[in-house]
Protein backbone atom coordinates (compact mmCIF):
# COMPACT_ATOMS: atom_id res chain seq x y z
CA UNK A 1 0.00 0.00 0.00
CA UNK A 2 1.40 3.39 -1.00
CA UNK A 3 1.84 6.24 1.48
CA UNK A 4 -0.83 8.24 -0.34
CA UNK A 5 -3.39 5.44 0.07
CA UNK A 6 -2.47 4.92 3.73
CA UNK A 7 -2.76 8.67 4.32
CA UNK A 8 -6.21 8.78 2.74
CA UNK A 9 -7.54 5.77 4.67
CA UNK A 10 -6.26 6.96 8.04
CA UNK A 11 -7.43 10.54 7.60
CA UNK A 12 -10.89 9.47 6.47
CA UNK A 13 -11.16 6.93 9.32
CA UNK A 14 -10.08 9.50 11.94
CA UNK A 15 -12.45 12.12 10.54
CA UNK A 16 -15.27 9.57 10.59
CA UNK A 17 -14.43 8.85 14.24
CA UNK A 18 -14.84 12.57 14.99
CA UNK A 19 -18.23 12.60 13.30
CA UNK A 20 -19.33 9.51 15.24
CA UNK A 21 -18.17 11.19 18.47
CA UNK A 22 -20.36 14.16 17.57
CA UNK A 23 -23.38 11.90 17.19
CA UNK A 24 -22.58 10.24 20.54
CA UNK A 25 -22.43 13.63 22.25
CA UNK A 26 -25.81 14.45 20.75
CA UNK A 27 -27.27 11.45 22.61
CA UNK A 28 -25.96 12.51 26.04
CA UNK A 29 -28.82 13.27 28.40
CA UNK A 30 -28.38 16.40 30.46
CA UNK A 31 -29.19 16.15 34.19
CA UNK A 32 -32.83 16.90 35.01
CA UNK A 33 -31.84 19.96 36.98
CA UNK A 34 -32.55 23.62 36.29
CA UNK A 35 -28.94 24.40 37.19
CA UNK A 36 -27.74 22.25 34.27
CA UNK A 37 -28.83 24.70 31.58
CA UNK A 38 -25.25 25.59 30.66
CA UNK A 39 -24.30 21.91 30.63
CA UNK A 40 -27.13 21.31 28.18
CA UNK A 41 -26.10 24.25 26.01
CA UNK A 42 -22.48 23.11 26.06
CA UNK A 43 -23.55 19.67 24.91
CA UNK A 44 -25.22 21.15 21.84
CA UNK A 45 -22.30 23.48 21.09
CA UNK A 46 -19.71 20.72 21.41
CA UNK A 47 -21.81 18.37 19.30
CA UNK A 48 -22.00 20.89 16.48
CA UNK A 49 -18.32 21.78 16.94
CA UNK A 50 -17.09 18.19 16.66
CA UNK A 51 -19.27 17.58 13.61
CA UNK A 52 -17.96 20.75 11.96
CA UNK A 53 -14.36 19.95 12.83
CA UNK A 54 -14.72 16.46 11.41
CA UNK A 55 -16.22 17.90 8.24
CA UNK A 56 -13.49 20.56 7.95
CA UNK A 57 -10.88 17.86 8.34
CA UNK A 58 -12.36 16.03 5.39
CA UNK A 59 -12.35 19.32 3.48
CA UNK A 60 -8.68 19.79 4.33
CA UNK A 61 -7.93 16.32 2.94
CA UNK A 62 -9.69 17.14 -0.32
CA UNK A 63 -7.48 20.22 -0.79
CA UNK A 64 -4.26 18.43 0.05
CA UNK A 65 -2.00 18.61 -2.96
CA UNK A 66 0.76 16.50 -1.52
CA UNK A 67 3.29 19.30 -2.04
CA UNK A 68 5.70 20.68 0.47
CA UNK A 69 3.27 23.27 1.85
CA UNK A 70 -0.30 23.77 0.74
CA UNK A 71 -1.20 27.26 1.92
CA UNK A 72 -4.96 26.71 1.74
CA UNK A 73 -4.64 23.55 3.82
CA UNK A 74 -2.50 25.32 6.44
CA UNK A 75 -4.96 28.23 6.47
CA UNK A 76 -7.85 25.85 7.19
CA UNK A 77 -5.81 24.05 9.89
CA UNK A 78 -5.03 27.27 11.75
CA UNK A 79 -8.61 28.54 11.46
CA UNK A 80 -9.89 25.27 12.90
CA UNK A 81 -7.32 25.46 15.72
CA UNK A 82 -8.63 28.88 16.87
CA UNK A 83 -12.21 27.66 17.00
CA UNK A 84 -11.31 24.32 18.54
CA UNK A 85 -9.33 25.94 21.38
CA UNK A 86 -12.20 28.27 22.27
CA UNK A 87 -14.92 25.61 22.18
CA UNK A 88 -13.15 23.04 24.30
CA UNK A 89 -11.88 25.56 26.86
CA UNK A 90 -15.36 27.02 27.27
CA UNK A 91 -16.74 23.48 27.46
CA UNK A 92 -14.40 22.60 30.32
CA UNK A 93 -15.07 25.89 32.11
CA UNK A 94 -18.79 25.13 32.03
CA UNK A 95 -18.04 21.92 33.92
CA UNK A 96 -15.95 23.54 36.67
CA UNK A 97 -17.12 27.17 36.84
CA UNK A 98 -20.26 27.98 34.78
CA UNK A 99 -20.25 31.59 35.98
CA UNK A 100 -17.10 32.22 33.91
CA UNK A 101 -18.89 31.25 30.68
CA UNK A 102 -21.07 34.23 29.83
CA UNK A 103 -22.65 35.30 26.57
CA UNK A 104 -20.54 38.44 26.43
CA UNK A 105 -17.30 36.52 26.95
CA UNK A 106 -18.19 34.05 24.19
CA UNK A 107 -19.33 36.88 21.90
CA UNK A 108 -16.09 38.86 22.29
CA UNK A 109 -14.02 35.75 21.70
CA UNK A 110 -15.94 34.95 18.54
CA UNK A 111 -15.50 38.52 17.29
CA UNK A 112 -11.72 38.40 17.86
CA UNK A 113 -11.42 34.95 16.26
CA UNK A 114 -13.54 36.05 13.31
CA UNK A 115 -11.34 39.13 12.77
CA UNK A 116 -8.16 37.05 12.89
CA UNK A 117 -9.57 34.47 10.51
CA UNK A 118 -10.76 37.19 8.12
CA UNK A 119 -7.24 38.59 8.20
CA UNK A 120 -5.81 35.13 7.57
CA UNK A 121 -8.18 34.17 4.76
CA UNK A 122 -8.15 37.63 3.19
CA UNK A 123 -4.35 37.64 3.13
CA UNK A 124 -4.37 34.20 1.55
CA UNK A 125 -6.66 35.41 -1.21
CA UNK A 126 -5.17 38.85 -1.81
CA UNK A 127 -1.46 38.56 -1.07
CA UNK A 128 1.26 36.64 -2.89
CA UNK A 129 2.58 33.61 -1.01
CA UNK A 130 5.88 35.24 0.03
CA UNK A 131 3.90 38.01 1.82
CA UNK A 132 1.13 35.75 3.11
CA UNK A 133 3.55 33.72 5.21
CA UNK A 134 4.24 36.77 7.40
CA UNK A 135 0.52 37.24 8.10
CA UNK A 136 0.28 33.51 8.77
CA UNK A 137 3.14 33.73 11.29
CA UNK A 138 1.42 36.68 13.01
CA UNK A 139 -1.79 34.64 13.34
CA UNK A 140 0.22 31.80 14.88
CA UNK A 141 1.42 34.28 17.53
CA UNK A 142 -2.21 35.30 18.16
CA UNK A 143 -3.08 31.62 18.57
CA UNK A 144 -0.35 31.12 21.17
CA UNK A 145 -1.63 34.18 23.06
CA UNK A 146 -5.12 32.67 22.95
CA UNK A 147 -3.83 29.44 24.53
CA UNK A 148 -1.99 31.41 27.25
CA UNK A 149 -5.21 33.28 28.14
CA UNK A 150 -7.13 30.00 28.27
CA UNK A 151 -4.54 28.46 30.61
CA UNK A 152 -5.01 31.40 32.99
CA UNK A 153 -8.81 31.12 32.85
CA UNK A 154 -8.74 27.38 33.43
CA UNK A 155 -6.31 27.54 36.37
CA UNK A 156 -8.48 30.17 38.07
CA UNK A 157 -11.73 28.29 37.37
CA UNK A 158 -10.38 24.97 38.60
CA UNK A 159 -9.00 26.53 41.80
CA UNK A 160 -12.37 28.08 42.62
CA UNK A 161 -14.14 24.80 41.73
CA UNK A 162 -11.97 22.69 44.07
CA UNK A 163 -12.43 25.22 46.87
CA UNK A 164 -16.21 25.06 46.39
CA UNK A 165 -16.23 21.25 46.48
CA UNK A 166 -14.01 21.26 49.56
CA UNK A 167 -16.11 23.83 51.42
CA UNK A 168 -19.41 22.15 50.57
CA UNK A 169 -18.62 18.47 51.19
CA UNK A 170 -15.20 18.38 52.89
CA UNK A 171 -14.75 15.21 50.84
CA UNK A 172 -11.27 14.61 49.46
CA UNK A 173 -12.59 11.76 47.34
CA UNK A 174 -14.82 14.03 45.25
CA UNK A 175 -11.87 16.29 44.45
CA UNK A 176 -9.77 13.21 43.70
CA UNK A 177 -12.41 11.87 41.30
CA UNK A 178 -12.40 15.19 39.39
CA UNK A 179 -8.80 14.69 38.32
CA UNK A 180 -9.97 13.78 34.82
CA UNK A 181 -10.91 17.43 34.21
CA UNK A 182 -7.30 18.49 34.72
CA UNK A 183 -6.12 15.63 32.49
CA UNK A 184 -8.55 16.54 29.71
CA UNK A 185 -7.57 20.21 29.82
CA UNK A 186 -3.84 19.55 29.58
CA UNK A 187 -4.49 16.91 26.92
CA UNK A 188 -6.52 19.44 24.91
CA UNK A 189 -3.79 22.05 25.42
CA UNK A 190 -1.16 19.59 24.17
CA UNK A 191 -3.33 18.83 21.15
CA UNK A 192 -3.70 22.59 20.64
CA UNK A 193 0.05 23.11 20.51
CA UNK A 194 0.60 20.04 18.32
CA UNK A 195 -2.12 21.26 15.95
CA UNK A 196 0.32 23.94 14.83
CA UNK A 197 2.36 21.20 13.17
CA UNK A 198 -0.53 20.54 10.80
CA UNK A 199 0.08 23.86 9.06
CA UNK A 200 3.20 22.34 7.47
CA UNK A 201 0.99 19.80 5.68
CA UNK A 202 3.40 16.87 6.13
CA UNK A 203 1.47 13.66 5.56
CA UNK A 204 3.00 11.63 8.40
CA UNK A 205 2.43 14.48 10.84
CA UNK A 206 -1.14 14.96 9.60
CA UNK A 207 -1.92 11.26 10.05
CA UNK A 208 -0.53 11.09 13.59
CA UNK A 209 -2.17 14.31 14.75
CA UNK A 210 -5.52 13.49 13.19
CA UNK A 211 -5.54 10.11 14.95
CA UNK A 212 -4.58 11.85 18.21
CA UNK A 213 -7.43 14.33 17.74
CA UNK A 214 -9.92 11.52 17.09
CA UNK A 215 -8.80 9.73 20.28
CA UNK A 216 -8.98 12.98 22.25
CA UNK A 217 -12.54 13.72 21.06
CA UNK A 218 -13.64 10.21 22.03
CA UNK A 219 -12.06 10.65 25.50
CA UNK A 220 -13.70 14.04 25.92
CA UNK A 221 -17.11 12.60 25.00
CA UNK A 222 -16.65 9.80 27.56
CA UNK A 223 -15.66 12.24 30.31
CA UNK A 224 -18.56 14.54 29.41
CA UNK A 225 -20.97 11.61 29.84
CA UNK A 226 -19.40 10.74 33.22
CA UNK A 227 -19.74 14.34 34.34
CA UNK A 228 -23.45 14.20 33.53
CA UNK A 229 -23.74 11.23 35.91
CA UNK A 230 -21.87 13.12 38.66
CA UNK A 231 -23.74 16.40 38.14
CA UNK A 232 -26.24 15.85 41.03
CA UNK A 233 -23.27 15.91 43.42
CA UNK A 234 -21.22 18.63 41.72
CA UNK A 235 -23.87 21.23 40.86
CA UNK A 236 -25.03 21.96 44.44
CA UNK A 237 -21.43 22.80 45.40
CA UNK A 238 -20.94 25.10 42.41
CA UNK A 239 -24.20 26.98 43.05
CA UNK A 240 -23.98 26.91 46.86
CA UNK A 241 -23.79 30.71 47.24
CA UNK A 242 -26.95 31.22 45.22
CA UNK A 243 -28.84 28.57 47.19
CA UNK A 244 -27.41 29.13 50.63
CA UNK A 245 -30.11 29.35 53.26
CA UNK A 246 -29.44 31.44 56.34
CA UNK A 247 -29.61 29.34 59.48
CA UNK A 248 -30.41 30.98 62.78
CA UNK A 249 -27.56 30.11 65.18
CA UNK A 250 -28.59 28.00 68.15
CA UNK A 251 -26.68 27.21 71.28
CA UNK A 252 -26.06 23.50 71.72
CA UNK A 253 -24.39 22.20 74.85
CA UNK A 254 -21.64 19.61 74.63
CA UNK A 255 -23.94 17.00 76.17
CA UNK A 256 -26.78 17.61 73.73
CA UNK A 257 -24.38 17.89 70.82
CA UNK A 258 -22.76 14.59 71.77
CA UNK A 259 -26.14 12.89 72.12
CA UNK A 260 -27.28 14.05 68.69
CA UNK A 261 -23.92 13.14 67.16
CA UNK A 262 -24.02 9.70 68.77
CA UNK A 263 -27.39 9.06 67.18
CA UNK A 264 -26.02 10.11 63.79
CA UNK A 265 -23.01 7.83 64.27
CA UNK A 266 -25.23 4.89 65.29
CA UNK A 267 -27.07 5.16 61.99
CA UNK A 268 -23.68 5.26 60.22
CA UNK A 269 -24.49 8.53 58.54
CA UNK A 270 -20.77 9.09 57.97
CA UNK A 271 -20.90 6.49 55.17
CA UNK A 272 -23.01 8.84 53.07
CA UNK A 273 -20.74 10.85 50.76
CA UNK A 274 -23.21 13.10 48.93
CA UNK A 275 -24.32 15.30 51.82
CA UNK A 276 -23.10 18.84 52.37
CA UNK A 277 -21.42 19.54 55.68
CA UNK A 278 -24.22 21.99 56.48
CA UNK A 279 -26.77 19.18 56.06
CA UNK A 280 -24.80 16.90 58.38
CA UNK A 281 -24.51 19.69 60.94
CA UNK A 282 -28.25 20.23 60.72
CA UNK A 283 -28.84 16.54 61.45
CA UNK A 284 -26.92 16.91 64.69
CA UNK A 285 -28.80 20.07 65.65
CA UNK A 286 -25.86 22.41 65.13
CA UNK A 287 -24.89 25.23 62.82
CA UNK A 288 -21.82 24.81 60.62
CA UNK A 289 -19.63 26.81 62.98
CA UNK A 290 -20.81 24.92 66.06
CA UNK A 291 -20.36 21.61 64.28
CA UNK A 292 -16.73 22.25 63.34
CA UNK A 293 -15.99 23.82 66.72
CA UNK A 294 -17.43 20.74 68.48
CA UNK A 295 -15.16 18.39 66.54
CA UNK A 296 -12.05 20.47 67.11
CA UNK A 297 -12.63 21.13 70.81
CA UNK A 298 -14.54 18.04 72.02
CA UNK A 299 -13.58 15.29 69.59
CA UNK A 300 -10.03 16.62 69.26
CA UNK A 301 -10.02 16.08 65.49
CA UNK A 302 -11.18 17.81 62.32
CA UNK A 303 -14.41 16.40 60.92
CA UNK A 304 -12.78 15.51 57.60
CA UNK A 305 -10.14 13.23 59.12
CA UNK A 306 -12.61 11.84 61.68
CA UNK A 307 -15.04 10.76 58.96
CA UNK A 308 -12.29 9.15 56.89
CA UNK A 309 -11.02 7.26 59.93
CA UNK A 310 -14.52 5.99 60.77
CA UNK A 311 -15.00 4.80 57.20
CA UNK A 312 -11.67 2.98 57.24
CA UNK A 313 -12.58 1.33 60.55
CA UNK A 314 -15.89 0.25 59.04
CA UNK A 315 -14.03 -1.17 56.02
CA UNK A 316 -11.66 -3.13 58.27
CA UNK A 317 -14.61 -4.54 60.19
CA UNK A 318 -16.38 -5.61 56.98
CA UNK A 319 -13.28 -7.31 55.57
CA UNK A 320 -12.84 -9.30 58.78
CA UNK A 321 -16.50 -10.31 59.10
CA UNK A 322 -17.14 -10.81 55.36
CA UNK A 323 -13.94 -11.95 53.63
CA UNK A 324 -16.06 -12.94 50.62
CA UNK A 325 -16.73 -9.29 49.81
CA UNK A 326 -14.46 -7.84 47.14
CA UNK A 327 -12.36 -4.78 47.95
CA UNK A 328 -14.46 -2.72 45.55
CA UNK A 329 -17.65 -3.82 47.31
CA UNK A 330 -16.22 -2.97 50.71
CA UNK A 331 -15.08 0.45 49.51
CA UNK A 332 -18.49 1.36 48.09
CA UNK A 333 -20.30 0.12 51.20
CA UNK A 334 -18.08 2.38 53.30
CA UNK A 335 -18.56 5.53 51.24
CA UNK A 336 -15.61 5.17 48.84
CA UNK A 337 -16.69 5.23 45.21
CA UNK A 338 -13.15 5.68 43.92
CA UNK A 339 -11.12 2.50 44.39
CA UNK A 340 -7.70 4.14 44.08
CA UNK A 341 -8.68 6.75 46.68
CA UNK A 342 -9.86 3.97 49.02
CA UNK A 343 -6.51 2.16 48.68
CA UNK A 344 -4.63 5.39 49.28
CA UNK A 345 -6.56 6.33 52.43
CA UNK A 346 -6.51 2.78 53.81
CA UNK A 347 -2.72 2.68 53.62
CA UNK A 348 -2.55 6.14 55.15
CA UNK A 349 -4.68 5.32 58.21
CA UNK A 350 -3.82 1.65 58.75
CA UNK A 351 -0.18 1.69 57.73
CA UNK A 352 -0.44 -1.35 55.46
CA UNK A 353 -2.14 -2.00 52.12
CA UNK A 354 -5.61 -3.50 51.77
CA UNK A 355 -4.10 -6.74 50.43
CA UNK A 356 -1.74 -7.04 53.39
CA UNK A 357 -4.59 -6.42 55.82
CA UNK A 358 -6.74 -9.10 54.17
CA UNK A 359 -3.92 -11.66 54.34
CA UNK A 360 -3.30 -10.80 58.01
CA UNK A 361 -7.01 -11.01 58.86
CA UNK A 362 -7.36 -14.43 57.21
CA UNK A 363 -4.28 -15.93 58.86
Image (cartoon, grey):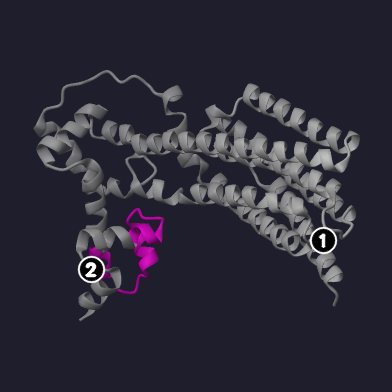
Identify the residue at the far bottom of this view.
363
Mark number for residue 168?
none
Q: Which residues are magenta?
A: 316-342
Q: Is residue 236 visible?
A: no
Place of residue 309 in the rendered image (x, y in percent of width and height, measured from the top left):
22, 53
Q: Residue at x 23, y 68 (%)?
A: 352
How far apart are labels 1 and 2 at the CA level? 51 Å
**In front: mark 1 or mark 2?**
1
Q: Is residue 177 magenta?
A: no
Mark 1 lies on a secondary structure that is helix
Question: What main secondary structure does the magenta stretch of the protein show?
Answer: helix
In screen coordinates, is 299 left or right of 78? Answer: left
Front one among 141 and 321: 141
Mark number for residue 12?
1
Place of residue 107 in the rendered image (x, y in percent of width and height, measured from the top left):
69, 24
Badge 2, how many Cα within 10 Å: few under 14, some, many 20+? few
Place of residue 215 in the rendered image (x, y in percent of width and height, measured from the top left):
66, 59
Q: Is residue 332 magenta?
A: yes
Q: Residue at x 27, y 18 (%)?
A: 248
Place of residue 68 in the rendered image (x, y in percent of width and height, measured from the top left):
83, 58
Mark number for residue 352?
2
Q: Residue at x 27, y 65 (%)?
A: 318
Amino acid sequence: MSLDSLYLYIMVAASSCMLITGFILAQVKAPADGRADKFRLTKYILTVAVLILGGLNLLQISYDSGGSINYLSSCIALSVAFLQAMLFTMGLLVLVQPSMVTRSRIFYQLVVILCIECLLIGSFILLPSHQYIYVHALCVVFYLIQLAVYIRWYMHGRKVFLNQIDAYYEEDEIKHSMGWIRFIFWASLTVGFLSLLMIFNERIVDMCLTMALAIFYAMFATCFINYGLSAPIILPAIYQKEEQVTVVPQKVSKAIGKDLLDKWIETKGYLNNDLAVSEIASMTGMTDEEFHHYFREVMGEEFRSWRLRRRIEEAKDLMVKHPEYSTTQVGKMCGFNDRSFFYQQFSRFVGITVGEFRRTALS
